[in-house]
Image (cartoon, grey):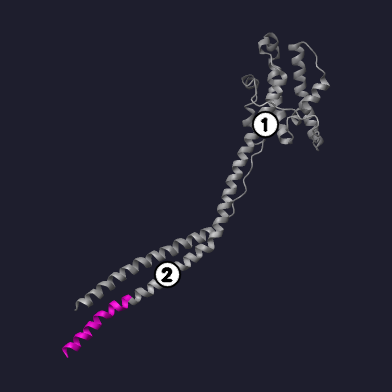
Amino acid sequence: MSLATKLENTYLSILRYAILVIATLALVAVVITGLMALSSAMSFEPSKPTYTSISDKSSEFKKEFSLDGFRKDNSPKEEAKPAPKDQAPAPAPKEDSFQKYVRDSAEKVNNVLLRYFKVVEGRDLDKDRTLSILINYPASNGIYDQDTQKFYWETLISVASELDKQIENIAKDTSKKIDVNDLLRWHANQVKKAIRKLNEENAEKDLKYKQKMAKYYADKASVPGLLMTAAGALGTFLAIIMTFLMVKIEINLRPLKEIAEAKKLNN
């Protein structure tokens, strides 16, 4: 066997293994891109988030409303500003039942305040005037939503009940006296603080939902490209296999060719 023939056989063997490696890589690419395309095509649209309402967090937020909390934050960081005089009045709730709820709640708080001023301050307040102030207080501080107002009144009644139980002790110890105006402002600020916290939580949910939707659309848009890549890899695989078969045939024919050449030399 000549040196040239030996070199050819060596190169054919090397080419054979190189083709096997490349064909394997091409097949792996077909499988991976095919699975990615299938996964993207079968992905489902993300479900919309369930936003948290004030009623869902009511029990958690109510823990922050107490007379002790008011005394601790006696100087509210954010002062509630009344509505400007020229501002259009807030629309009255459409449901009469809610109007009744607001009035009943305001009367409960009003009765406590009247008793507080009578026992502690030794003076009587105009019942109708204070009731009107209490009813309009949420709207004057930018609290219009009915669910939020319900939370407002629930927590204010809770704080007022605490105050009612302490009236006798406050009358005996004037150092425990409170400023009712400060108490109402503090309470309104606490409600708005809870609403801000709730809005931030819902905004975070909305952001995550938008990110999921962006990924969903990106996955769907990637399907054609992945299919083209898989098709290209499959074509490459088939072409390499054909080349491999040709090399294999050439390698198998080499011995026959050498036998035929040897016979010619012997003859």
Q: Position of residue 231 (x, y in %)?
A: 48, 68
Real-space Cα separation, disc 2 to disc 1, in angstroms: 65 Å
Residue drawn at (62%, 34%), measured in percent from left and top?
197
Residue at the disc numbered 2:
236
- Element type at marker 2? helix
Residue at the disc numbered 1:
192
Q: Quadrant of residue 106?
A: top right
Packing grade of label 1 (10 A; few <14, some 14-19, many >=20) is some
Residue extending farthest top: 172
Magenta segment boundaries in residue numbering? 247-267
Q: Main secondary structure of the magenta part?
A: helix
Above or below 36: residue 17: below
Asked if the stretch drawn in magenta spans residue 264, the answer is yes
Q: Is residue 99 left or right of residue 255?
A: right
Residue drawn at (71%, 14%), measured in percent from left and top?
167
Q: Quadrant of residue 17?
A: bottom left
Q: Position of residue 241 (x, y in %)?
A: 38, 72
Q: Quadrant of residue 235?
A: bottom left
Disc 1 residue type?
A: Lys
Can residue 58 be seen by looking at this rendering?
no
Above or below 110: residue 122: above
Closer to the N terminus: mark 2 or mark 1? Answer: 1
Above or below 87: residue 169: above
Q: Position of residue 214 (x, y in %)?
A: 57, 52
Q: Quadrant of the N terminus?
A: bottom left
Residue drawn at (20%, 89%), measured in percent from left and top?
264
Residue extending farthest bottom: 267
